[in-house]
Amino acid sequence: MNIQEILHSTEHRPWQIPTGNWKYYQEWNRAIFLHWQVELDELEKLIPKELEIDLYAGKPWVSIVAFTMEKTRPKNLPPFLPISNFHEVNIRTYVRFNNKAGVYFLSIEGGNYLSCKLAKGISKLPYRYSKIKRAENQYQSSNPGFGDKLEFEYAIGNKLKEKTELDKWLTERYALFQDSNRFINEFEIHHLEWPINEIDLKKLNCDYPRFQSLIKNNPDKIHFSEGVKVIAWGRNKKEMSEYNSKIG
C-alpha cells in the first residue's frame, strides 16, 4: 500500500489526521511489545504534571517496544541507509494531552550512534545510543553507562483473529508527547492498524535500574507485529506552565 492509500485509510483513528503537510516517513518493523501494569504513584514521579496519565480499568501501563526502524526519511527525499535503518528499543507509557490519547517516552535507545544524534537533535526526543543486536527470534540491547540490559528470545504465534479492547488501547496510539526545556512537544502520526500476532517468550532478561519499580517480573501482556508504515508530522510546541526536569 502506498502513502496516499495509507493517508486515506482513517476509519480506525480516534480523530482526523492533521490538515498540514506531513514531514517524515518511516517503518517500524518486526516489533515486540512487552507490557506491564504498574502503580500510579510510582509512574507519577516520572511524568510531567502537564500530562495526564492514561488509565485502563483504573490502572496505568508501561511498555517496552523493541523493533527495527527502516526507510526513515524526510518527505520528498530517499532513505540514506547509513542512518535510515537501525534497531530501536523504547520504554513508553500512556498519557493524554490536548484532548488526545498518546504515548510518553521514558527512554529511547537506538543501535546507530549517528541516527540517535540526528533524531535527538531534530525531534528533541530522548534518544541515546545503545549496543543492539538482532538475530532470528532474538533481541539484545545493552547500555553500560546506564546499567541497562534487555535480552530475550521468542517464537511468533498465530495472528490474532480478534483484538481485545486492551490490545487496541496499548497499540493504537496516534500522538506522542514529550517534555523538552519549557515545552511539551506534540507529534502526530498515522499508520494502518497494527497487525498483531501471538508471541511466546522463550527467554527474558530485563534490567533497567532506573525503572525497577515499574518493570519487574514477567510482562502482563505481550504482542508481536510485522510492523507498520508510519507517516509523521512536525513538532508542535506547547509552553509548560512550570518545568521540572525528568529522566532523559
Image (spheres, rainbow, N blue to C red):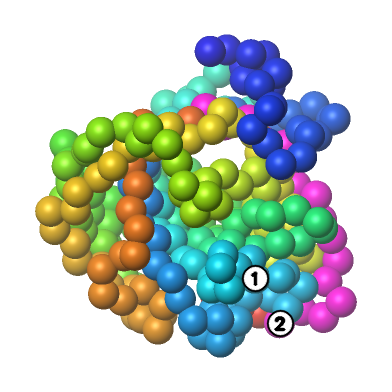
Foreground: disc 1 or disc 2: 1
Q: CA distance from mark 1 to mark 2?
A: 16 Å
Quarter of the picture holding the C terminus:
bottom right
Q: Is residue 144 left or right of residue 211?
A: left
Q: Say above or below: 140 vs 212.
A: above
Q: Residue 237: say if magenta.
A: yes
Nearer to us in this view, 12 or 237: 12
Q: Residue at x 25, y 45 (%)?
A: 199
Question: What's the mark number on residue 188?
Answer: none
Rate crowding at label 2 as few (under 14), some (14 to 19) or many (20 or more) other CA atoms within 10 Å. Answer: few
Disc 1 residue type (three-letter)? Ile
| Spot occupied by residue 192 in the image (x, y as percentages of width and height) | 56, 28
Q: Where does the magenta region start and end?
A: 229-244
Q: Which residue is mark 2?
A: 244
Rate crowding at label 1 as few (under 14), some (14 to 19) or many (20 or more) other CA atoms within 10 Å. Answer: many
Q: Secondary structure at mark 2?
A: loop
Nearer to us in this view, 124 or 64: 64
Q: Residue at x 65, y 54 (%)?
A: 102
| Spot occupied by residue 198 in the image (x, y as percentages of width and height) | 28, 42
Q: Residue at x 65, y 43 (%)?
A: 174
| Spot occupied by residue 233 in the image (x, y as percentages of width and height) | 72, 37
Q: Say above or below: 180 vs 117.
A: below
Q: Is residue 210 left or right of residue 120?
A: left
Q: Which residue is mark 1?
A: 53
Where is residue 97, by image quadrant?
Answer: bottom right
Give the mark, 1 or 2, whose residue is nearer the N terminus.
1
Where is residue 105, by image quadrant?
Answer: bottom right
| Residue 99 in view of the camera | yes
